[in-house]
Structures are given as structure tokens and as C-alpha cells.
Image (spheres, grey):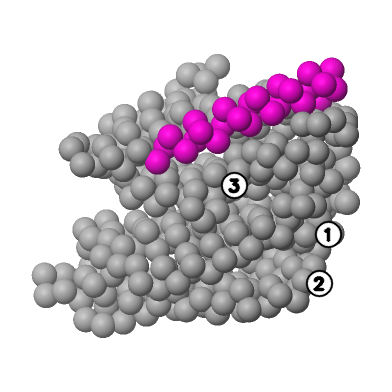
Amino acid sequence: MMKIISILILMLFKPSKLMFLLCMLIIMFLFLSFMIKHDQDCFLFYSGLFTDTLSFSLISLSVFIMLLMVMSSMSNINVKVNSLYFSMLLTSLLICLIITFSTSNIIMFYIMFEASLIPTFMLILGWGINLNGPQQEMWAPKNLYVMASLPLLVAFLIWSNNLSSTNMHIMYLYNSYWVTSNLWAFILIFAFSVKLPTYLVHLWLPKAHVEAPVAGSMILAAILLKLGGYGMLRMISKMSNMLLNLTPMLMSWSLTGGAMIAVFCVFQTDIKLLIALSSVAHMSMVMSGLLTFSYWGINGAQFIMIGHGFCSSGLFCIANMSYERMNTRSLFIMKGLQTSMPVMTMLWFMLCTSNMAAPPSLNLLGEMNSITAMFSWTHYTLLLLAMLVFLAAAYSLFLFSQTQHGKLPSKMLTLPPASLREWLTLLLHWIPLNLLIMNPQSIQLLI
């Protein structure tokens, strides 16, 4: 079935036909999936599959980003040559993500949760940089996945065995010795925080982004990081009594780590590393909002995840467009784009301001909800929250000013203008990011 879908995609792989088809599909998903209110509590369409507002919004985001990934990769020669394998990988990855976001079986959730990394890893190996010599050491932090995932599997197996059920929606917590243990609570949170990721367990993320092609970076930032947030959203209500003693420590870890990463972003010289590390700073606010166990915090985390999915994917996409023209990711060399592509500068500005949660982006609504929840939880978070907000504006404006102002290198006096495909790809990132704030009920959780 997957091969048939891939062949059908190849039949339409002529740029004009494929771009027209993708634009129509993206516009359809934009209005049907996001702009229409669908506040269902839970809709069971199979014995082990379901959908609610959380899963439906993330599935829609996955399909949306997958279509944009194909559009952004059409200029890659290696993708055109191996288009069958590329489309098969994207199809298999999309299937894994849809099952992950819609399954009610906790063991199937774990299997698909981890299986989604296989096509991503193959995508990086096949279309990323060559892993020769020292570059092979870059994937050493992948061992974090094994270290965090195996205890999570053990916890799920013990949990389902004690309750004689694998349905995550009817699972509840006994007051047994292992449930009330802070160790088990930390294991569950640690496994999801690696995927989120949070500070100290984020080392795999910049390494993966450096090696990944533009499609890999887009799916990593937009979707795969949301797997950790989705797992926390599903499990945190079932672990609230377990996390009461750990919440202050976890909240301090998340906010302090986010502020430190935001400081590191200001001093980055690699454009992909800067965008990748900014994702860690944004996800720290997601984790902190969830740990407040409040309506405002949980909905704020959901808004940030959806908004960040569009914004970070768009930033990686436009950064790759600049890289294709200048053959460098260094901010010391990538300068003066405003003089050669002045209209593209406007899209750089719109995406950078959305990254710093300027109105009317969905990130603004999410951060307002999360900051309100955290400030209500305790006033001691005020300083760290102020640092996060200020530094987000600092590194976003730093990214914009470094790339757009200054003089072009002497060997690059003229750069080719942006094509219609590139304009559509960037606009289809920015439009839903700023239109969703007009109808936030379409992705608002029911608590």
C-alpha cells in the first residue's frame, strides 16, 4: 500500500503539476482541519484508534508539514534522483505519526513513538551530510533515546499489568508502592523530556539538525519534538498525584534550562544551530505550562506546540533557501540579503517576529496562557519568564539583522530571485500561524 502511494506521487512529480496539487491539498487542510471548530471530546472510529481535539490538531499539522516538506525538497537533486525512496520514507513516517497520535493502546503508542525515529534516521543518512570520520560521533547522543525509552517501556508494562488494561483513557493510578514512587514519576517525565527536549538532554537535537536535509529539519522541529509534548499531555493528568513532590524541581529545571539555552542562541554563528536551539527554549515553556496542571497552562502548551510547528519549520525552510544561494550557514558570511532579495527580507522579518511571539501569531496566545499559569503557580518564576521572553526577542532580531544587513560577500554580488514554489512554501507556513489566533477554539483542549 505504501509503495502504491509513493508511485502515485511520482506520477505527479513534474514540478508544475505537483506544486499545484500540493497547494490545493494544503489549502484544503488549512480550512478544514484548523479553521473549522471541532471541539469533540473523543471520537472512537476503531477499537484501538480514536481522535479528539489534541490528536486531530497534531495529525493535521503532520499532514500539513509533510506536504510543505515535499514542496521545499523539489529543488534537491538527490531527492529527484531517488524520489521513490524519498516518498516511501515520508509516507512511512506519516503513517507512524498518525498512529502515534490516534492510538489508545499504550503499548502501540510506545512502539509507534519509537518507530517514527527509523524513517527520520534514514532520511538523515540518505539525504543529509556524509557521516565520515568525526561526523559519525555526532550521532553518539542517540544513546539517550535508548537510555530513556527502555525504562519507559518497563513502566508502561508494569502499569498495564497492574490495571489489566492497555487503554490509556481508562488507565488510572493505584496507590501501590511503585506508583507513588518519585523514581517512577521521574522515569515517565524523563523519557518524554528527551523527545521534547529539555536542557541537558537536548544534545541530540543540534547534532541531528546539522546533519539533516531541509526536509529532515522541518519534520524534526515541527512534528517529532511534539511527540514528547503529546506524551506529557496524555500522561500528566494520570500522574498528577505522583508529580506533586517533583513539580518544583522539574519546573526549575525546565525554566532555568530554557533561559540558559536562550543565552546560547545569542552567541551562535551557525544559522541551523541557532534555530534548533531556539526550539529547546520554546519547548521549556511547554513543559513548564503542563506542570502547572491548570487549564491555562495546558492550553498554552498546546498553542505553543502548534505555533512552533509552523514557525520553526518555516525558519528552517527559508534558511535552506539562503544556504542554496550562498553555500554557507555561517552568520559571518551570510549577510546583505536585503540588498539582493529585498522582498524575501519581508518574509524573514515575518517569521522572525513570529518566533519571538509578536502579534498576531499563535505563539503569542500560547505564551500569554503559559505565563499566566506559571505566574499564578508561583511568583518566583517571574525573573526566569522575563529572561525567556526578552532573550527570545534578542536572538530572533539577532538572526534577522545578521542575515539581512551588511554587505554581500565579494563573490556573491547577485543572487537568484525566489521562485514561485519558494514563495508559496513560505507563505503557507506564515498564513496558518497567524490566522489560527482568530479561531483558537479549533485547537483548544477540553478539560
* Amino acid type of the residue tagged 2 in the rendering: Ser
Residue where numbered disc 1 is placed: 294
Residue 296 image point, x, y percent: 81, 63
Residue 30 image point, x, y percent: 66, 52
Residue 82 image point, x, y percent: 31, 29
Q: Chief secondary structure of the magenta span? A: helix
Is there a contact, CB below 8 Å, between mark 2 and mark 1? Answer: yes
Is there a contact, CB below 8 Å, between mark 3 and mark 2? Answer: no
* Vertical arrangement, residue 134 with respect to residue 102, above or below: below
Mark identifier at residue 240: none
Q: Nearer the viewer, residue 63 or 31?
A: 63
* Amino acid type of the residue tagged 1 in the rendering: Ser
Q: Is 227 positioned to the left or the right of 170 in the image?
A: left
Between the C-alphas of marks 3 and 1, the distance is: 19 Å
* Amino acid type of the residue tagged 3 in the rendering: Ser
x 45%, y 60%: residue: 277
- Looking at the rendered image, the quarter that the N terminus falls into is top right
Residue where numbered disc 3 is placed: 193
Comes first in the chain, label 2 or label 1: 1
Q: Is residue 79 magenta?
A: no
Residue where numbered disc 2 is placed: 376
| Magenta stretch in the rendered image | 141-167
Q: Is 137 positioned to the left or the right of 174 in the image?
A: left
Between the C-alphas of marks 2 and 1, the distance is: 10 Å
Residue 301 image point, x, y percent: 70, 57
Look at the numbered disc 1 and give the secondary structure of its residue: loop
Q: Nearer the viewer, residue 146 or 72?
A: 146
Q: Is 144 positioned to the left or the right of 246 in the image?
A: left
Q: Residues within 10 Å of mark 3 (few under 14, many from 20)?
A: many
Q: Is residue 159 magenta?
A: yes
